Image (tube, rainbow, N blue to C red):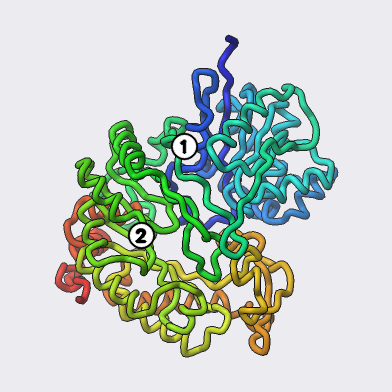
Amino acid sequence: MGRARDVLLVLLPDFLAPAAHRRQRFPPLGPAVVAACIASDRVRVRAIDLLLDQDLLAPNDDARDAFGDGERVLRWLHGQPDAGLEALLDRTLAALDAVGGRTADIVAVSVDRGSQGAFALALTVEVKRRFGRRIVLGGVATQRIREAMIQHGVVGADVVTRASTPGDIAHVFEVALALPEDRRGAPVEPIDQVVTLVRGGRQAARAGTGWPMPDFSIYDLDRYCRDPLAPELAADAPYAGQLGRTLVLPYHFAFECQFSCAFCQNGGTQENKPVDEVVRDLARLSERWETREFVFFDTQINLLAPALSQALLAAGLDLRWSDSYRVRPREPGDLELMVRAGCASLTVGVESASDAVLKAMVKGHRSEHATELVREAASLDVMLRVNLLSSYPGETRDDFQRTCDWIQAHAPAIDDIAPSSFYLTADSPIGRDPERHGLRVRGPRSLGGTDKFRKVFDSLAYDEVGGVTWEEREPLLQQSEERLHAAWLRGRGALAQLPAFPPALMLALRRRFGRCAEARAEVRRWLNPRDPRTQPDALRTPP
């Protein structure tokens, strides 16, 4: 039968990611799903998460800048020496060598974001040159990498793929294993994808059936088990680790989104993993890894929430979980049912408090509905993270001020906000028909700083027809995000001294405290135990 084949999954760092992204790292879900699709008696899978490698994440600024500059990487590929870039690659290859990268049958590199593209290209070239291994490159933005390889005659990844279903993923690795070990040639794509379009040219969702339970055994999970409050605090904070270490696992059961917000590149149809399979997976994951806490990475849980909640209650799993939630659609009693089934926190796309802007966004709710949801969540002790979208085309100063006023008024009930200025993508409804929305596309947008991490890599610059030009708009984008954050802090009052609560921290606090007010007050006491204002009554969420 021959020996079993070894696959090493390499999770790339993103040198442009903010520190908070690294501090609250979950065991990555995508590679765990890939491992479940391909692992067998004939294939062994391991993973190395380079985002956890502190030596790698602290290169000199020159090396960090190198991988934010695709042209610089291309010059190096064409023979121009680059000491900073080469030093970083040396450290990376040493890390891979230490976990068997030199002898693996396949080195599979996962690209999560477009801002990782330059590093992925350079790394696969060096893995091929030094290790001579078969290489699979998958994830987002891979098409751009494949085109660059072909255009510049680069030898690196053997397979560059956008495979996104269990059957396709398994087929990709079968093809890769059949390639000669010493292959050196242009990349191939084994998947002849036929894209089904729906609703104005949007891609249909993948089928919800056939997805295996994620295989987290590929990781050293102890590295992801941490006290979720400690990384958010200054080194001299008096907090003594009262929450303790916990493992939070990610999970995914809803594919795409049947709603069609004008600014979003997702949407059109939605498919869900069957509820009974979801509950079985969660039960097995909870028992195997001894955790009751999960973050669900779905676009929105609204349509499946009642059925899933009832199934979780019937199974008696006693889990705590978080997911994304739309303001609408929801029925009376849905949120209360979710809370009884273990929902402890939600991320809600409020976006704006201007009804005119919400209508232009095709969000499907009005500001009064967002207010109702926040108040109901507060009454049920659900912690909230709120997404806000500023600088939307056509937004006036009055529209923006309404959103600032709204977030300030409701800040005591909101434990984190994610303000983002609008960015235009070609595959969103507004990007496919910009003239209808009063925009004139100027071409690719130049992203800088953390925007290369936070915004879609292929964002576009634009003018508002008869209105604000891109030169006028661009300097205001970051300012609008900062003003929203400042409004939230003003409304927080005494709570403004607290750090923002990421999902893992919300789950940990709700595990220990029955009421949100108790949790917030206790965190303040942990930060400053001598402050007489740190009493639950002083920090209670207004009705």
Residue 229 seen anywhere in this rendered image of the structure: no
> Are circles 1 and 2 on residues that touch, CB within 8 Å?
no
Classify 10 Å Cα crowding around label 2: few (below 14), some (14-19), many (20 and above): some
Residue 172: x %, y % from top left:
63, 33
Q: Residue at x 41, y 38 (%)?
A: 223
Q: Secondary structure at mark 1?
A: loop
Q: Amino acid under label 1?
A: Gly
Residue 107: x %, y % from top left:
63, 31
Q: Secondary structure at mark 2?
A: loop
**Quadrant containing the C terminus in the rendered view:** bottom left
Q: CA distance from mark 1 to mark 2?
A: 22 Å
Residue 64 seen anywhere in this rendered image of the structure: yes
Specify the label residue 437 is tagged with: none
Q: Residue at x 21, y 44 (%)?
A: 318
Q: Residue at x 54, y 22 (%)?
A: 43
Q: Amino acid under label 2?
A: Asn
Q: Nearer the viewer, residue 478 or 211?
A: 211
Classify 10 Å Cα crowding around label 1: few (below 14), some (14-19), many (20 and above): few
Residue at numbered disc 2? 302
Q: Is residue 266 left or right of residue 526?
A: right
Whether 75 is drawn above or below 103: the answer is: below
Residue at numbered disc 1? 210
**Quadrant containing the N terminus in the rendered view:** top right
